[in-house]
Image (spheres, helix red, strand yellow):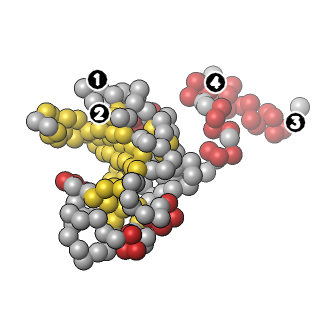
Amino acid sequence: MNIRVVLLLVPFLITGCSTVSNFSFSSLSPFNWFGGSPMLSDSGLGDISSATPLDEDSLNKTLDDDYRLRKGMGMSAGQTTTFFEAMDGTKLQLAFYGNEQGKVERIEVMDKGIKTPAGTKLGTEFSELFEKAYNHCEVGTGDYTGSVICQSPESKHISYIFSGEWMGSSSIMPPDDKLKTWTISKMVWSAK
């Protein structure tokens, strides 16, 4: 018997194959060898979708424990809401918000490693996706004052928050020639 085969089988024999229960064959894919980030798509972020329970165990499992989660409470339309923030060290990377049924309803992405199927990510310039803001974008309000929110051409569930420099009023849409150099500062997925 080849010594390599023996060396591969010995750990299974010693541990009684207990580690096999946590093994995923998808980890054999070359795309997963280097710890790739989940993809933001029409259905959600990686395996996190509108069917995912908004609880720490479910989020940690689907995120492969790549982030440290912290739970928070807030107010929305006079109702107390729960959210989870995914941290990398002290840096906020993701935020998950739920609905009344306790499922994920909105995901905010601030992680530069996460992309859409078309390769859109934080830092992508407005001009790479749009020629004009008309029919695609609106002026940000509330938490997004001073930004421009645009519907993704890839999905009605994904919006891009663009930020940049402009000396005009934050309540007015900047001209297209100014917007062309603005970049995505946040991507938002919404189940609605």
The reply to whether residue 91 is visible in this rendering is no
| Residue of label 1 | 101
Of residues 47 and 40, which is closer to you in this image? 40
Point out the tag, 3 or 4, that comes first from the N-terminus: 3
Q: Nearer the viewer, mark 3 or mark 2?
A: 2
Point out the tag, 3 or 2, that comes first from the N-terminus: 3
Marks 3 and 2 in Cβ contact (< 8 Å): no
Please, what is the three-letter code of the amino acid marked with disc 3? Asn
Q: Report the side of 30 relative to 181 (left or right).
A: right
| Residue of label 4 | 17
Of residues 64 and 18, which is closer to you in this image? 64
| Residue of label 2 | 98
| Residue of label 3 | 2
**In the image, residue 161 lies at what x, y percent?**
35, 57
**In the image, residue 29 lies at what x, y percent?**
68, 41
Please, what is the three-letter code of the amino acid marked with disc 4? Cys
Residue at image location 29% in from the left, 38% down from the top:
97
Marks 1 and 2 in Cβ contact (< 8 Å): yes
Disc 1 and disc 2: Cα gap in Å?
A: 8 Å
